[in-house]
Image: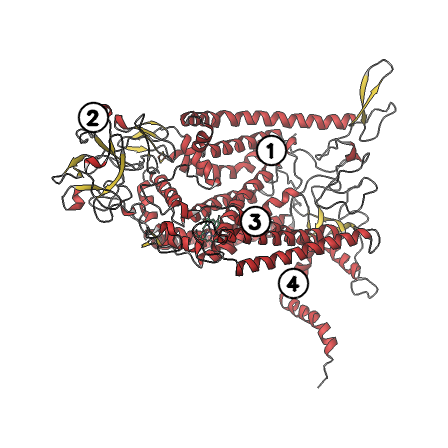
Amino acid sequence: MKRRTGKADLQQAPVTFAKGVDERFQASTPLRALLNKVFPDHWSFLLGEIALFSFIILLLTGVFLTLFFDPSMTETAYEGAYPALRGTEMSQAYASSLHLSFEVRGGLFMRQMHHWAALLFMASIVVHMLRIFFTGAYRKPRETNWVIGMALFLLGFLAGFTGYSLPDDGLSGTGLRIASAIMLSIPVVGTWVSASIFGGEFPGHLIIGRFYIAHVLLIPGGLLALISVHLGLVFKQKHTQWPGPMRTNTNVVGERMFPRYALKQGGFFMAVFGTVALLAGLFQINPIWLFGPYRAAEVSSASQPDWYVMFMDGLVRLMPNWQIYIGDYSIPPLFWPAVVGLGFFTTAPMAWPWLEARKTGDKRIHNLLERPRDNPERVGIGSMAVTFFLWATISGANDVIADKFHISLNAMTWAGRIGLIVLPALAYFIAVRVCLGLQQHDREVLAHGVETGIIRRLPNGQFMEVHQPLGPVDDHGHPLPIEYGGWVVPKKMNRVGALAPAVKGFFFPVEKPSEAPVSPGMPPISGDTREEITSGRK
Amino acid sequence: MTTLHHDAPDAPEPVDVHDPRLTRLDVVKEGLRRDEIELVTYESQFQGTNSKAEKRVVRNIALLFIIAGLAAFAFLAFYIFWPWRFQLGHTAGDYFTPLLGITLGISLFAVGFAILAWAKKLLPHEVSIQARHDGMPPTDEQKITGQTMIFVGDELNQGVQRRPLLKGAIGFGLAPIGLVAAAPLIGGLIENPHKADQPDLFTTGFSPVKNGGNQVRLTRDDGTPIRPEDVSTGGQMTVYPGVPHGATNEYADSPTLLIHLRSDDAEETRRNADGDRRNRGSMWGDYVAYSKICTHAGCPASLYEQQTNRLLCPCHQSQFQITRNAQPIFGPATRRLPMLPLGVDEEGYFVATSDFKDTVGPDFWERP
Ligand code: HEM
Ligand code: FES
């Protein structure tokens, strides 16, 4: 028998192991491709990551909550640690949420982390979506991911709503009641839908249990599946990038996934997690013990849902009381904003990539992003949608605003109704003008150079500002025209290296760059053309 | 500046990775080449090794990691030793959750920044370019796969085309199986809202039919009955049906607002009520009772404005005019609040002489 030479064996062990793995799974080629994969970098590409990280936090904290939460509507008399409610009749669900808040060490912290992470999850989805929209990242070949993103918002909305309902406190019960009314408002089948979901008349004894399984299994499962496909597609189709030096429609300029990119992601995850921890520790959220158990006869005024539900609440408030009668039957006005509205606003935008492609006749593949200003029409439509959403959201709090600023509620409602029609149109107009203005300014700088701030007096007494041309000049010293590259045009002297670069980053500069750095972040200031950095419009 | 392509003329040549003269970086670069990646820039962020700048960055990063560790210890210490149980008044326990948040937050932030700084400041600065492969002209693969799929379709199809019996049988056999899959899932959930003789949709706890034919008393939430003198003039009270569990969510449609109007308002209210088919004779003296469940979306319409005799629903601000049969006068509600016919029994307590004559709560398609 051969004697083992311990040390050499140990060193050889990982190699042997790796060989063994590869012989069985043929992993080395895909693994290398993964390690080497190049990712472009830009701060706005991190928004989707925030959503992903908040989702992970939701999974972690949510699982903890399930260990204590009891989704039962059986009534009990509260005997827990919170004196103000002792002796009160309440559901087990509410009692166990109170237990979680007061009698589980760190339970309140976990509840608040879960809730803050939910708010952050939805917020980052929305902001991420705006980034995608305004830069045209959804264009071919990425339409599928746009659709998945919309579906993620809808599922997140449902996750948030079902979660909010679980503690069965005064606020969530009111929300459930409105949900049942929304179901009732559906023509023909409304009462059947409500009776089927609640297992009889509102509130019944089943709804918390049903919402629970939806909240902790069905919806997270759906989210997980969609998120996986979403990321898989990002991976397969490779990330879009901004135009810039060396960047073309057929390459990706950035850094390899390992180690730098992955490390940065890890650090960023920790920062997001830290933010959620700080929020959860310092800012109370959903203090259910103050709301009391749900009672059909009681509601606290100024009761607001979570922010991502408020736009719907606002639309419901603004809807005029138009009831449609059809013979002996009728459609209540609640149906339009709450069923048709929500359905429309979460699904109709899914068609946008195809609608736009159809209108522009653009069937090409786009891997380069478009600066918003280069597509005023898109920005206009996006601004319209954002304004509509924001205005509806604000209207969801119109009673609070009326109260705080001593405005009549009726005036607020009317302002809301009129604003909902007028403001989006106005936003469209303004956004288009702003884009055109910015475009114009870019073209001016390209044609005449950067404003230097130096005023020169000519022999004839005339004053004029000296411009620093961005490119070569002709015999008279006039700049030769430069073609627009679809990317930032330098407008300050330090951006063209004539002054010290502005200091960026959270550390002091490691070393003073001696010359103007030419990094991918810097604008293309030379005039040579690259393929396909068009604005997508002819 | 030139456009750099994977197929640019200066693309590196393949190398033999088993060549012993190659450095590790050479092998890595061969991998990059195979993945169509070009490492354009790969340089240390520092001039020379062990430069002052580098040491400073390293110190900062180390400091961040140490802060993270300390904060994590602090978190554990607070978690274990700090008093955390809820107590009345202002106690140390109030700071438990904030302390957890601050220590965990600082710890995670410090780790995060340490890692970010490490990646951004210490690792070599790099620019890589990788080729994309979308938008390629159609390849043989597309053609082959397409033809294969059509071929598979044909294989199945021809069989069916030539054998019509099979076609019918398949259709007949598969459709019911699909239904079988759906039926138990959905069927179990379906609940007929109209199945009872007295569907809950149209009745409340005040229905005498469900109370053995006896009129139902109005009670407080603790179940005690109410005499007229218990509600002062201009005052109001939320009342519930005097049946077992009448004040619980089992009777979520029943909460009712009992209002004692001032006599001039009462007169106007009576005039309007008597002019209405359903509300005629439903008041008792200067007292009137309306369902508290908003006809819009079911919130309790609970804000009573004495001056104007309006009832405001806090959910979407529908306003109801009490003196005019609780007609909605503003907001999204379309339907008035149903009136509960009031009476007083021989012992002097308020009763409902019958159930609401109108359907209570949010509106729906087949409401009579
Ligand atoms: C992915 C999206 C999710 C969202 C948007 C979300 C949102 C929410 C919200 C807003 C609440 C109310 C919190 C409060 O009491 O203040 C909640 C409660 C809860 N969630 Fe989630 N959640 C998600 C995922 C999960 C997962 C994956 C689980 C478990 C596996 C979970 C378990 C729970 C439990 C048990 C409660 C009730 C705890 C209580 O209120 O006492 N959640 N959720
Ligand atoms: S529920 Fe009363 S106004 Fe909507």
Residue B241 lies left or right of residue A298; in this view the side is left
Q: Which residue is mark 3?
A: A278
| Element under disc 2 | helix
Looking at the rendered image, the quarter that the C terminus of chain A falls into is top right
Q: Which residue is mark 2?
A: B270
Q: Which residue is mark 1?
A: A361
| Element under disc 3 | helix
Give the CA separation, mark 1 to mark 3. 49 Å
Which one is in front, A286 or B296?
Answer: A286
Q: Is residue A219 visible?
A: yes
Mark before the other along the chain sequence, 1 or 3:
3
Q: Are discs 2 and 3 both within one chain?
A: no
- Residue A274's place in the image compared with B356, above or below, is below
**What type is the residue that disc 2 sits on?**
Arg
Q: Are discs 1 and 4 both within one chain?
A: yes
Looking at the rendered image, the quarter that the N terminus of chain A falls into is bottom right
Q: Which residue is mark 4?
A: A27
Neighbour class for label 2 at 10 Å: few (<14), some, many (≥20)?
Answer: many
In percent of the image, x 51 and y 47: which residue is there?
A116
Determine the chain carrying the residue at label 2: B
Q: Position of residue A405 (x, y in %)?
A: 47, 28
Q: Closer to the observer: label 4 or label 2?
A: 2
- Residue B92's place in the image compared with A339, above or below, is below
Which one is in front, B218 or A439?
Answer: B218
Count of numbered circles in the view? 4
Q: Position of residue B56 (x, y in %)?
A: 77, 52
**The quarter of the displayed image where residue B276 is located:** top left
